[in-house]
Image (cartoon, rainbow, N blue to C red):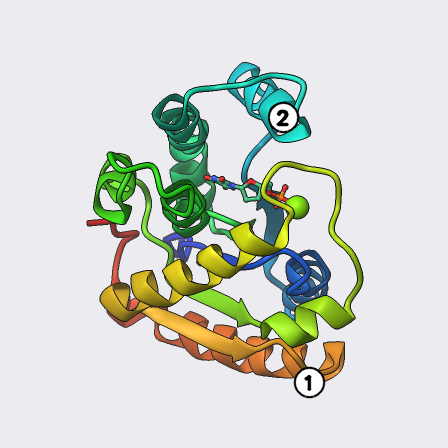
Amino acid sequence: SQQTPTRRGTLIVVEGLDRAGKSSQCELLRDYLSEQGHNVKYIRFPDRTTPIGKLIDSYLRGSANQEDHSIHLLFSANRWELAKSIEQDIAAGITLIVDRYSYSGAVYSAAKANPTLSLEWAWQPEIGLPQPDICLFLSISAEEAAKRGGFGAERYENESMQTRVRELFRTLFERQKDVCVVDAGRTLEEVSRDIQAAVSDCVAQLDTVGPLRTLG
Ligand code: 2DT
Ligand code: MG
């Protein structure tokens, strides 16, 4: 008897500013895809559990300082150390939902306005990482974000940083072109319905896409 080869999983990335509702939408999407019979895993970057992730965590909490380029490369290294396991999961037919990825990586670092840390420079270490089959950008206005409550206590959680991050996401996604922008300033249900539709289309086209690609 012949075995049918495993259909590869889909690599789904969810991006957005703080308070765009990424985590809630990732959970809803995980439940939806599980109900559809997919084998699903939900992961997030930074992965604060690895040795590199622990350095990142203490930086974000403010208990350690890092030079701008150095912390940028640690965020990227945190993706590279998990790249093989992402590829293996996808090949094994697991669909991965990834909360933040290279796009946050490039944009948050470039938002520091360090003269030698441009968006172009920040993107370079991402080249060669697994490329998402779909990147959903949950877009909310500054006004809507403000309505959703105050900032947390971590580094980057302040108005001026968020404003620059919002502008840089727009610049990056004008270049990348492969992003699906979702208006996240609506109810959970409205947003999740759009996300489900976009992901279902992406999954249906997977056979024509072929194997997992790499970021360029
Ligand atoms: P969370 O609030 O989602 O845990 O993110 N960040 C994230 C970077 O600066 N570079 C990266 O590569 C990634 C993945 C965004 C914590 C903060 O870390 C920022 C917010
Ligand atoms: Mg946060």
Q: Is label 1's Cβ within 8 Å of ligand 1?
A: no
- Whether residue 12 can be seen here: no
> Quick one: 143 or 57, which is closer to the camera?
143
Q: Which disc number belongs to residue 74?
A: none
Q: Residue at x 59, y 61 (%)?
A: 38
- Residue at the extreme right: 149
Q: Is label 2's Cβ within 8 Å of ligand 1?
A: no
Q: Position of residue 148 (x, y in %)?
A: 77, 67
Please state which amino acid type lies under the numbered disc 1. Glu
Number of other residues with Cα within 10 Å of mark 1, as a class: few under 14, some 14 to 19, many 20 or more: few
In which quarter of the view is residue 179 placed? bottom left
> Quick one: 15 or 37, which is closer to the camera?
15
Q: Is residue 75 left or right of residue 28?
A: left
In which quarter of the view is residue 8 placed? bottom left
Q: Is residue 55 left or right of residue 113?
A: right
Q: Position of residue 47 (x, y in %)?
A: 58, 32
In which quarter of the view is residue 211 placed? bottom left
Numbered disc 1: secondary structure: helix
Badge nearest the viewer, 1 or 2: 2
Q: Position of residue 37 (x, y in %)?
A: 64, 65
Numbered disc 2: secondary structure: helix
- Whether residue 43 can be seen here: yes
Q: Residue at x 19, y 49 (%)?
A: 216
Please state which amino acid type lies under the numbered disc 2. Asp
Q: How many marks?
A: 2
> Quick one: 78 or 149, which is closer to the camera?
149
Q: Which residue is mark 1?
A: 190
Q: Which disc number belongs to residue 57?
A: 2
Tell which circle, 1 or 2, labels the residue nearer the N-terminal end: 2
Q: Position of residue 184 (x, y in %)?
A: 62, 76
Q: Is residue 180 left or right of residue 142?
A: left
Check the image and report above or below for 114 versus 161. above
